[in-house]
Amino acid sequence: MIGFTFKRVLSAIPVLIVVSIIMFMLMKMGPNPLELLKQDPKFSAEDVKRISKLNGWDKPLVEQYVFWGKNFITGDLGISTVDQRAVWDKISERLPLTLMVTGLSMVVSLMIALPIGAYVAIHKYSKSDYVATLSTFAMMASPSFFVALLLQLAAVKLQDMNGGTLWFYTGGAPACVGAGSDSGILKTVGSCAMTPIEAFRRLALPVTALSILQIAGWSRYMRSELVGVLNQDYIRSAMAKGLSGKVVFFRHAVRNALLPLVTIVALDVAGLFGGAVITESVFGLPGMGGLLLESVKSTDIAVVLAIVMIGATLVLVMTTVADMLYGILDPRVRVN
Amino acid sequence: MGPGRTTVIERASWRTAGRLASSFALLIAAMLLAAGCGSSAQSADAAEDAPPQKGGNLVVGLDQQPQCLNVVIVCGGMAVTSNITGPLFDSLLTVDAEGQDAPLIATEVPSTDNGRVVLTPEGGMVVTLDMQPKARWSDGKPITCEDVVFAWKLRMDERWLVRSREGYNLLSKIDCVTPLRPVFHFKERYAPFLGIVGIAPMPKHVLDGKDFNTFLSDEVPISSGPFVFSHWDRSVEIVLKRNEDYWNAGNDDEPWLDSITFKFIPDSNTLKIQLRTGEVDVIAPPPDSSLKEELEAMPRGSFSSEPGAYWEQLAFNTGKAPLNNRDVRLAIAFSIDRQQLADVVLRKQVGVLQSTLLEGQKDYYLPAWKDIKPDPKKATALLEKAGYTKDGAYYAKGGKPLTVVFKSTAGNNLRLKVAQLLQQKLKGSGIKMEIAMEPAEVFFGQSTIQGNFDIALWAWSSTTDPSQRTLFSCDKIPTDANEYEGNNYYRYCNDEVTKLLTKADVTPDVGERAAAIKQVQQLMRADMPMIPLFQRPDTVAFSNRAKGMDVNPFGGMTWNTYDWSVVAK
């Protein structure tokens, strides 16, 4: 296991270097963001030159990349050229909310999708299967922004029905995430746990919006895998041996059906870091998706590279974890 | 769609989905706002009648959040930063309710008439101001000339990422003749001097020795305005509290509110919904075709809308064929119906703009484009005069159909509608128009600067000063040779216009300057390097508990926060 992990870490290094070079070059290929400011007649070419120099953008590209790379290796993510703040501060003030929203949606989705998928697999071609199929297709066909707007509409209607009392906020982050980098990620999550009602009223709609697509997709995967597994000979053998239906189902069928889902969920866990741009935007949530988008637009290379590199690292880590989990779930797979 | 791919798909297709989203969002938002239509006017009137009361918190919903709180440096260039920090820093001069320059910390607006502006024989000018003795920082220290000098020196310091030094770099010095009398010495005559001498003083006793690139990034420890900074929960909200020792309190400048909370919701439709649910009290939604109807249908709220400082215009690239031919430009001008554009695109929220200046710039405004109305016969005659002959549906010369490429910013529905209407009209006149909408970064960062367009649509922002030299003079055409300096993206060059614009910029006398600027308008109308279309409406919508909001195109959303109040329930 240790040897396997060591090999995976070694093979990840060139991947990360290539990713960083591609991202760096892509960002540098765009126009100088200061050129956009020149649309303001008060902003002159001299101003562009002066500020570019202060930001170090007048140096050769290789020098800029090497400077960034050296700092990155030592854990220094750099300084944002937009507001001169440490990149890690910017990330750490956005991360807690993103992790809460996307993490909660993942937990909620798993809790709902897996039982639904399992139930309809057992009762395939029943009325409940058809209802679930129709519902999941409708859910998958609904873009997240549309679902988000419908949820907001529902919240407004609910308010009208309750004589003006608003149960679910239609946007905005809970107050507990505002303190940002000063509090640290765990403290922020803890603070939200101390004000669960406010956090729930703020996050209910975005978590629901994000969960709907995941529930639809995952329940379909669960259903199709389980239907396939339940038709296998070894399941019939197990039943013939006299094992109870529960044991066969949970120990032999579900365990095998979960294998493809492990990969998908593992990659999605890595994706939690990146946030959800549209849902964050519609609900006014200051998360990682918004930070990445703002940083790309303003060519804030240090922030973009940091987010991409952390994201890429997480993907590599989670694929390794998924490989290890395969070994645990399926004794036939031996990690070597 | 695979399971759990929500976030991946969102990231991959946010742009396309965003466009779709705006269309759906408009529909849904309209449904939401229309739900339970109430009598907005009636309830607004009731709120208007009540006298303002001290106390309360007002929640302002903003679709952008500031990157920092320092308006002087690069990260503070967004309008939202000025809106939030405006109530924290009073300046020597301000803008009044009519959008005219007015004194604030200074005792009067300097001019050649009142003798505060003196032209020197060496070609420079000297401007003298007097400051109000009662002006105080929130810590009780007096606001003095030293703070004015310090504010200027900050802008000229090479260490700081100052946004622009335009105009400030023409000052040779500021003398403090007395602690309350700054005298500004300009190296040359500079007509837009009010924007420079109207500077907001900076607290030397607080900022001296600090890193100006970062010190005001997260918090503003002192104030000279009606409110003081309370806290900023990054990306969530910024809260300002009443400045209990506001130097200008009393009279009409009473800060009534205990506090103002600025909340950040990037989606403008969500903002409208939040106004409907009462989660926010005030919003400034971006212009939109159906905005007026949506807000009129909103229960428990009201709104105020005026033509704003941003004005949309159709730019012609006069530097290359076919629009380097004045007759072709005029033919296009007589082909389009600007009234119809304004009516269809903005549903009669604003009228047609007839000048490159706004009506609010009273002394300088001349409606030079008012005779430009749709006239197909004139358009046909002009195209034939330019050597084009009808070949099928389109005019052509040398076997090539008359084709123009229209460019503007993608994702802006108003501009897309203008493009589509324009395409129809030009087709009717035998001109083929191809539409290419580009991301703002490409459009403003490359196409306009490098002249890669025939017709383009964008907006300029006006201030109280009418200077437009950088937009239309020959030496302000961005080229490789001048390192793309200047905003004359039209590639328009008329020596007489350049001469008059230069003269206008060095003539502080209002009457003389106005004469030159009006002459420029007439010359440009004749040359037609661009066609003004309309001012984008500035709209402020507010709940019935909010009072005192008023639109001021040159003053920003928060220009009169001292008048804001809430009606007690």
Image: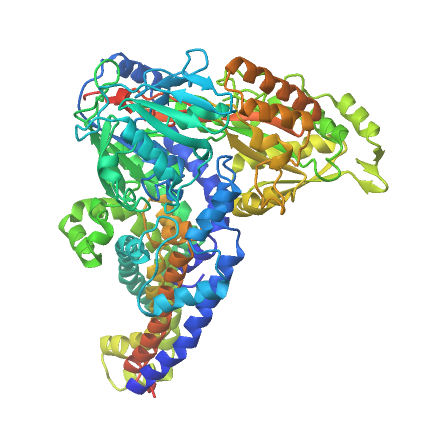
What residue lies at 42% left-to-right and 40% top-to-bottom? B163
Quick one: A252 or B72, which is closer to the camera?
B72
Is A15 located above or below residue B418 in the figure?
below
- B119 vs A248, left or right, is right
Percent across and percent down for residue A25 are: 50, 62
Residue B454 quadrant = top right
Near-viewer residue (B439 or A262):
B439
Can residue A121 be seen here? The reply is no
- Name the one closer to the observer, B233 or B462: B462
* Quadrant showing the N terminus of chain B: bottom left
Q: Position of residue B272 (x, y in %)?
A: 36, 33
* Residue B418 vertical placement versus B296 (above, below): below
The colour scheme is: rainbow
* Quarter of the figure that contains the C terminus of chain B: top left
For the view shown, which residue lies furthest in the front direction?
Answer: B122
Observer able to see residue B113: yes
